[in-house]
Amino acid sequence: MLRLIRNKFLTGLCIGLSLLTLVPLFSIVVLVIRNGFPLLSANLFTQLPPAPGVDGGGFGNAILGTLVMVGIALVCSVPLGILAAIFVNEYAPSSKLASGVRFVAKLLTGIPSIICGVFAFAAVVMTTHKFSALAGGIALAILILPTILITAEQALLGVPYAFREASFGVGATPFQTIWLIVLPEAMPAIMTGVMLAVARAAGETAPVLFTALFSQNWMKSIMEPTASLSVLIYNFASLPYAYHIKLAWSASLVLVALVTVTNILAQVIFAPKHR
Amino acid sequence: MKGIVFFSAITLTLCFPRFPIPTMNRILLAASLLASSILPASAATALNGSGATFPVPLYMRWASDFQKTNPNITVNYTGGGSGKGVKDFIANLTDFSGSDVAMSDAEITNAGGNVLMLPATAGTIVLAYNIPGVQAGLKLSRNAYVGILLGLIKNWNDPAIAKENTGVTLPNTPITFVARADGSGTTAVFTGHLAAVSPEFKDKVGTGKSVTWPVGIAGKGNDGVTALIKQTPGAIGYVEFGYAENNKLTMASLQNKAGNFVTPTLESGAASLSSVTLPENLRAFITDPEGVNDYPIVTFTWLLVKKTYTDAAKAAAVKAFVAYGLTAGQAVAPQLGYITLPANVVSKVQAALATVK
Amino acid sequence: MGGNSPLTGSVSPMSAEYRRRPDIFRAICLFASILTILLLAFIFGEILIKAWPAISKFGLGFITGIQWSPNRDIFAVLPVLIGTAASSLLALLLALPLGLAIALFLSEDFLPPAIRHTIRFVVELLAAIPSVVYGLWGIFVVIPLVQKYGTILSAKFGFIPLFAGPAYGNSLLTASLVLALMVLPTITAISRSSLVSVPYALREGSYALGATRWETILSVIIPTAAPGIVASSILAFGRAMGETMAVAMLIGNSQRLSWSLLSPSNTLSALLANQFAEADGIQVSALMYAAALLVMLTLGVNIAGEAVLRHTQKATAGLR
């Protein structure tokens, strides 16, 4: 009897805590929607930012810039993270190199976003003598690498060993096992990590500010200062002009929407095969 | 154009049918990246600048208006702080920079002497307050405001403040001073003035972009300080005039060197500027103006340009942009909360600008 | 399985010859691992090189001193270190139970799938919100609340150093609350992944032995998913320590040492964010020294986390 009471109590506690967390969650989402909605229009995607004191305009260049820089970051760190995780988990789990990689991944999580920017500044901006979207992308890549590595390793760990045994049993090589069996099975969990990484990369200001600066014009190449939504929000929200502050909120709304849409797409494309 | 290539490549990769590993997607993305970076850039001259955050709105407006009449030139100014602006300029990463504190001699040497400091506009720093029951027009004498900042005066109904404000009922509220948490040219100018009027302040706190204040809390950026002042009853802090004005903060009238209490306005700020004589290198810090109607805390802000550019097109573009700022650009300054440069200053700056090649 | 196949070229996978071929894929993965380690080495090396002038000038006094005055060239970060550790720890303490509760909620079937999917969607929405917006929300919503309730709290319980007044809106508590909300999606998403991947056979076995749902969860499912949960905590803690913008806007940026949750504080990341752009000379070096300390702090925390993990793994050894 006591066990049943305990059971019900814990269920209630769990539900209670979840609902409690939903309160601030809804508060912030409602704030973003309420403040961002008024200026929402197709113009935001096609026009350039307005000058202070002038109304109208949008932030199409910032949207493009964020997409490009997050894209570069993904291209750099997703393969690197997944491949390293495969090595650590499948090929040599008890080797010194594997422990080294796990250790390094955990250390990298604590690096403040601004240091990623500073490092990319020293490594890319100073060597190419330009602020660029490439440098911004690389800064973001460093930022998200630990997330991708750690979640990829967890995802691979989550694939039951029986799958690998069965695959070796029919004569597949390690490569075939990993590429055709383990990795597809781990994909949904890896995608969770990638989506968290995308969300973080799209919303970070400091690394991008130091490397890609900002621009009020359309992007022409990846080797020049580029606008991004996060820097736009940061800049505009700190101006004393009401119109620009409203535009900053709309940019936040657009950013959240873009990341969510990407998230949903990823979940649909990489849905778990069975369950 | 390249943007469209990019955008479509990214959308396509997202819609690609599921593949064991999305390598196809990544190959497509990498290919489109490569393609767009080797696609020829357009023939326009692009000017990039970074630096002081104070004049960001003004320079952005100038850039936008200038580009309308000069479609072959794109001008891009981002903030980041005076220090960053100077560092980026010395490292040759920007074509021009903004700085609230010009450049020190050491920095000029680091730049190889290839720099001109051109005053572009000016602004005032105000002490904005939030005292329950007190409207605009609080008068603060030199002793009063220095005392507050040193932590000697702790309450709003202190006699030192009440003395100058006989018609106002000052409540029994503790004073919360709000400073800047981030390093900033605004702090440098403000502390520069305080050190000039109070040897005790100079000794205890000193001047600089980032100092340790004896009392108070700190907010990030002018906007952070503004928000803190608005939310904290009994708060007083220093912000740029534009922020106080646009956020409808009540500003204190400060006692100047001549002994008068001056309300911060664009006119009183302009009055302080007109009495300044600029030296040869155009670097003048106005720590304590002497005129009768001068508001005591004003500063120029400088555009740093090179004396010689390796690219002739860039030199021409910089000259055209700065010339625009000195003429049509000055007309739009008051609208955004900046002080128009006096005519004698403008002519000196134009003369210096003409030497750029 | 003989004959040609696109994956193996012209060699049969059943032949001994095939097995002797070098595994190029393994080499690529090895390369990726080495690259990762090199990356950290470069970053940490860069930080140390830039920090060296400050390390040699201030030594350990940097860690124990309390004054940070850039204009006087005096730098020390003890209050900042304490603030960093306190805010991240508090954020994790708040986010872990809540995140785990939601993750359990989403992985078990207490409620119909439609509700679960909506909540999962909303939590992942939280992850998408940029850090600047968290800062703004903190300024408009959290600060007034903390100011109001903090004043009441310090009036009633002010004798406890943790709640000593005066209560500021910009305080350690505000920053910790917002940080907790920021790291919540990380904990929820990864823990949920872990919980869901616990083999169904284990659950069935537990129920077959007569355990109630919660006994199963607490004794079987959570310990099995523990590595994933700990991993999510490590990522969350790292994020909390590395978060710059939101904290810089909310924590009050005070260098004064105080035990109270309700007074302004500072973190290493916020310090870096506020001062880096305008810094030059020895100040840059001091900031890099602070960054190096932050990495050391992460190291310390991770070692502690590993110890916790080893303790829980004893119970689940052999299950895979």
Image (cartoon, coloured by chain):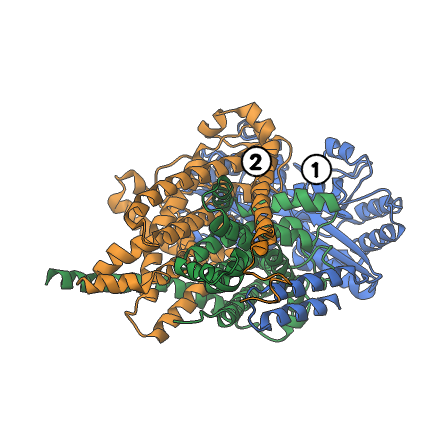
Chain colours: A green, B blue, C orange
Left or right: B317 as drawn, with respect to A105:
right
In depth, the one of A275 and C39 nearer the eye is A275
In depth, the one of A204 and C112 nearer the eye is C112
The percent position of residue C310, horizontal first and vertical second, equals 34, 43
Question: What chain is tagged by disc 2?
Answer: C
Same chain for labels 2 and 1? Say yes or no: no
Q: Residues within 10 Å of mark 2 (few under 14, many from 20)?
A: many
The percent position of residue B323, horizontal first and vertical second, equals 83, 53
Q: Name the residue carrying label 1.
A: B285
- Identify the residue at image location x=48%, y=55%: A152
- Identify the residue at image location x=72%, y=40%: B102
The percent position of residue B113, horizontal first and vertical second, equals 81, 35
**In the structure shown, which secondary structural element does the residue marked by tag 1 occupy?**
loop
Spatial separation of the CA atoms under disc 2 and disc 1: 31 Å
B78 shown above or below C111: above
Q: Tell me the amino acid under the disc marked 1.
A: Phe
B128 shown above or below B145: below
The percent position of residue C150, horizontal first and vertical second, equals 33, 49
Q: Tell me the amino acid under the disc marked 2.
A: Met
- Identify the residue at image location x=70%, y=49%: B50
A42 shown above or below C272: below
Q: Name the residue carrying label 2.
A: C288
Quadrant in the picture for residue B154:
top left
Q: Are marks 2 and 1 in contact (CB under 8 Å)?
A: no
- Tag on residue B18? none
Question: What chain is tagged by disc 1?
Answer: B
Asked whether the viewer can see residue B247, the reply is no
